[in-house]
Amino acid sequence: MTSKATTWRATVLTLFPDMFPGPLGVSLAGKALASGLWVLEARDIRDSATDRHRSVDDTPAGGGPGMVLRADVLAAAIDAADAAPGGPKDRPRDRPGDRPRLLMSPRGRPLTQSRVTELAAGSGPLIVCGRFEGVDQRVIEARGLEEVSIGDYVLSGGEIAAMALIDACVRLLPGVMGKQASGAEESFSEGLLEYPQYTRPQEFEGRPIPEILTSGDHARVAAWRRAESEALTRARRPDLWAIKSGQNRPKNTTDG
Ligand code: ADE
């Protein structure tokens, strides 16, 4: 079989397919979607329910509040997505199982720019949006779902988290941002926060643009930006700064 390049595709399994494309349908991601640079497929988990009430959830085993998404219904929804036209079986680059299968969940591993870069470089993930109190653990294991969190706070469902993840990937796809992408990207992947930016007017409410930035001296501008990035990272993100300063330590020093 000859392998053909495929368009990056995000398949989202959700109980609220009407939430999509939502913000992904406007601005940068929306323009790229309209011009076919990527594909969004939102599938209703409820279409895989089998009883006459189309139920997707049930009470938690062992008791407790809320409802849990049923393993059988969600597994059927994942299998149906794999079998759908345009799904993995039609796509030489990702046989079923090759495609990352993500579950948006506050108990997942925190999403990072490096994971986003990996996901953008592939042919696109299948993303399950959790709701209720959670998802039956057995389907997480049986379908190899990778739990992903977008931060230490609880949203009412995984849809907005999925949109954040997709947006972060789409802006990295070839042709979506052109040259603009590189600067900000490098800054984060280098493990530092971005330096402050300024534009006209030259003075705003008594605050001038820092003089260095209008000096035309590119080396001084670069040094100033680097120092600002480092100071911001140290103050706001000691976790990132600890990694960064660890990397910069000379390799041949001996401890103690
Ligand atoms: N669903 C609810 N809260 C979430 C979070 N913080 N990250 C990912 N998915 C979620």
Image: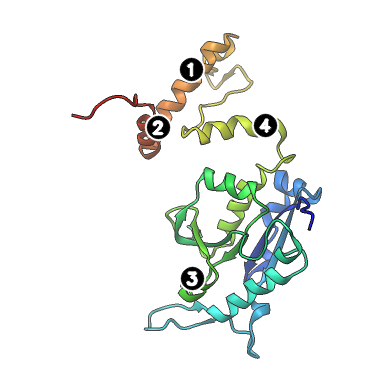
What is the x, y in percent for residue 81?
68, 69
Q: Earlier in the sequence, mark 4 or mark 2?
A: 4
Q: Secondary structure at mark 1?
A: helix
Q: Which residue is mark 2?
A: 244
What is the x, y in percent for residue 115?
53, 48
Position of 22 with respect to 37 (left or right) is left
Which of label 1 and label 2 is nearer to you? Answer: 2
Position of 182 with respect to 195 (left or right) is right
Q: Is residue 114 positioned above or below 11 on the image?
A: above
Looking at the figure, which quarter contains the C terminus?
Answer: top left
Q: Are marks 4 and 3 in contact (CB under 8 Å)?
A: no
Residue drawn at point x = 76 percent, y = 50 percent: 5
Position of 12 with respect to 31 (left or right) is left
Q: Amino acid at mark 2?
A: Lys
Crowd tier of the residue under label 1, counting other residues whose Cα lies within 10 Å: few below 14, some 14–19, many 20 or above = some
Q: Earlier in the sequence, mark 1 or mark 2?
A: 1
Q: Earlier in the sequence, mark 1 or mark 4?
A: 4
Give the alpha-carbon distance from disc 4 to disc 2, as whole Å: 25 Å
Give the alpha-carbon distance from disc 4 to disc 3, as whole Å: 40 Å
What is the x, y in percent for residue 53?
63, 88
Q: Secondary structure at mark 2?
A: helix
Q: Earlier in the sequence, mark 2 or mark 3?
A: 3
Residue drawn at point x = 56 percent, y = 15 percent: 213
Q: Which residue is mark 3?
A: 141
Using the image, tell me which numbered label, if any, was put on residue 224: 1
Q: Secondary structure at mark 4?
A: helix
Q: Amino acid at mark 4?
A: Gln
Q: Which residue is mark 4?
A: 180
Q: Is residue 20 positioned above or below 142 on the image?
A: above
Give the alpha-carbon distance from disc 2 to disc 3, as whole Å: 35 Å
